[in-house]
């Protein structure tokens, strides 16, 4: 499972030119799921996302987590995080999980984040053509892959 986490001042998901969901002062989390991912990845990654100290404290040092900040979270599925680009110029998505595998894990990470943060998690729509608008704060952008936990 791969995620790109962006600390944002605001972010929104538009579907068919209508705002589907939006947040302010929180994390925009793009989630890519591959065939070998499982619920252990969901639990590890959810804890990592919420406990990363990437929000500034009073001394302007990144020392606070999403939990500390009671931050809003927006989770968007993005299979292209598993693009293979080694050969040729057209990315291959063979490692990206099929919807049969990906949808339950996508829903599981949303649910796990909701439980751990004790608040609603905003989302996109799995498989939809979405327009994502954001104001990256910092900018802070972090990539995490559950297959590389070092």
Image (tube, grey):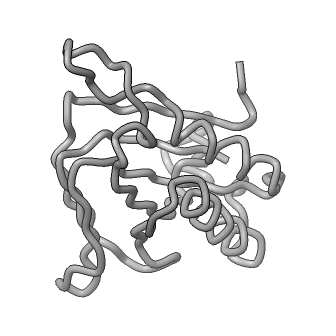
The picture quadrant where one finds residue 2 is top right
Q: Measuring from the top left, give residue 55's x and y in whole percent.
A: 31, 29
Q: Is residue 88 left or right of residue 28?
A: right
- Between 58 and 12, the one lying in front of the other is 58
Q: Is residue 73 left or right of residue 92?
A: left
- Between 68 and 48, the one lying in front of the other is 68
Q: Measuring from the top left, give residue 37's x and y in whole percent.
A: 79, 53
Residue at x 20%, y 36% (from the top left corner): 137
Q: Measuring from the top left, give residue 108's x and y in whole percent.
A: 68, 66
Residue at x 55%, y 41% (from the top left corner): 88
Q: Measuring from the top left, give residue 22's x and y in whole percent.
A: 25, 68
Query: Relative to 144, is 105 above or below?
Result: below
Residue at x 39%, y 56% (from the top left corner): 73
In the rendered image, the quadrant that contains the C terminus is top right
Query: Relative to 10, is 121 above or below?
Result: below
The picture quadrant where one finds residue 129 is bottom left
């Amino acid at each position: 499972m791969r995620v790109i986490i962006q600390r944002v001042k605001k972010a929104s998901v538009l579907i068919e030119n209508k705002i589907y969901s939006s947040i302010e002062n929180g994390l925009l989390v793009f989630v890519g799921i591959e065939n070998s991912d499982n619920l252990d990845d969901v639990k590890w990654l959810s804890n990592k996302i919420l406990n990363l100290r990437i929000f500034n404290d009073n001394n302007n040092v990144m020392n606070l987590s999403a939990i500390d900040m009671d931050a809003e979270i927006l989770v968007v599925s993005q299979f292209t995080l598993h693009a293979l680009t080694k050969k040729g110029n057209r990315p291959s998505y063979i490692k990206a999980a099929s919807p049969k595998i990906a949808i339950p894990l996508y829903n599981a990470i949303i649910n796990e984040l909701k439980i751990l943060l004790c608040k609603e998690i905003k989302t996109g729509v799995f498989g939809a053509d979405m327009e994502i608008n954001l104001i990256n704060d910092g900018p802070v952008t972090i990539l995490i892959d559950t297959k590389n936990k070092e």
